[in-house]
Amino acid sequence: MKKIIITIICIVLLCNLLKAQDCSCKANLDSLIKSIEGNYVGFNTKMNKIGFSAYDSAVKTLRDKSIDAKNYDCYEILVRYVSLFKDPHLRVLINRLSPSNVNYDSLRMIFARLPKKRINLDSIVKKYSLENTSGIEGIWSLPEFNYKVAIIKSDSANKYEAIIIKADNFKWHPGQVKMILYGQNSYKIKFFIADHTPVITKGKAQNNIMNLGEYGLWRKEQFGKVINSSMDTMIEFKILSNKTSLIKIKSSDITLRDTLDQVIGKNWKNITSKENLIIDIRNNSGGHIMTFDTLNRLYITKPIHTDAVFIKASQDNISLYSESLINPNFNEEEKKDFKELIDTLKKHIGNVTKVSNEDSIYVNGTTYPKRIFIITNSGTGSAAELFVMHAKQSQKVTVVGESTKGALDFTEIGRNRDLPCPFWQYMCPMGMGEHKYIPLIDNIGIQPDRKITEDIDWISWTLKAIENGI
């Protein structure tokens, strides 16, 4: 009798699970459209550029295609919908399922079935493991993400393909092409990101290192071993000379705020006794502006103006903000601010609501460092860009490097949101600034005060520039 009861319970639970998830493409597209139209703070702004007629036509086409679409074809349709808005923060994502999740194997097989090169990987690995290869051809790895590829010459002139040898075996599998490189020495690269979507970037192989910016620092192997296996930590401090120190911040995720506070606190005497400071935020794709708070005293020389903030008041958005009230990464004063914000939103459901006025940030700054150079590149985005915008208002600060990513106009992301199918999630901005002090920069970026060419050591160039008053 007990076995029968357990069996019945299991069947009921399974039925409820199947009922709760719906992987029909049309259902997921409809859910995504409804959520974006109801929760996305930039919807009306973007519609002024897209036009309602063009939008309705595009949505109809996608809905028609979604009827028969399955698996990765459906994912591409969802991506095509959000791409209508050209907002770097509005994105469809692959759910990061754990191997123990009931849906893990099904999602894994979607990516395992994507095209592979018909090639003998074992013989290629053996060949390059026994040879001391020069140039771009050979075995390259990205240890941080467990990627290993064989870069081989294609039939076309000056064309190479990077074929997966080893990866996560979830979204990427041996034989799949991770990137296509065009050129010699310096390369134009068609790089396939985690979800297999192609992006165009550039790179140069030098001293067995290929720096692809936000797409990783790839290291070459010789005789089966990585030549340069040093891995950067997320936050790092170095003394470069008796005049200059360096802080490298690779992420501004809110979970790293305490770490940055500790690094700055531990090295406070060194930082505030030297004339110069270099802050390297290349490939810092964002996180939370509060992570940078500990740097305020170092660069502020006058009040830093901040924009008024507007948020789309909806039940879904209020639910996400409510999660901040139990998030241990925010202190009690910050949680009190979130509670007031939530109360304001509840009074204005359906509207884009002003939740704070323009303001200024001011603290008694330190005399030293007297000069601060911030290094940026195309991988610097979101909250890291907002930090740059604040810091640029200081007389101490000069921005060097290359233009940032351009992902700041619509923010306040919260966590990833779920779709009916457990395979897919999405990000949806809830807030935006008034853009009185912070200009619109999406897909444009922040231009540096001084550009650095890609074929030199950026830290060495910056050190020379800051110490020689260039």
Image (cartoon, helix red, strand yellow):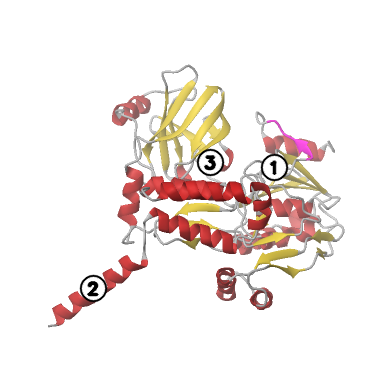
SS class, disc 1: loop
Which is more N-terminal, label 3 or label 1? 3
Q: Nearer the viewer, residue 46 or 251?
A: 46
Which residue is label 3 attached to? 216
> In the rendering, at what x and y percent does residue 25 appear?
40, 53
Q: CA distance from mark 1 to mark 3?
A: 22 Å
Q: Nearer the viewer, residue 243 or 357?
A: 357
Q: Nearer the viewer, residue 314 or 426?
A: 314
Which residue is label 2 attached to? 10
> In the rendering, at what x and y percent does residue 233 appear?
56, 50
Write down the quadrant of residue 175 in the picture. Answer: top left
- Kindly report which numbered mark, 3 or 2, lies closer to the viewer in this rendering: 2
**Amino acid type, callout 3:** Gly
Which is more N-terminal, label 1 or label 2? 2
- The label on residue 444 is 1
Start and end of the magenta stretch? Answer: 449-453
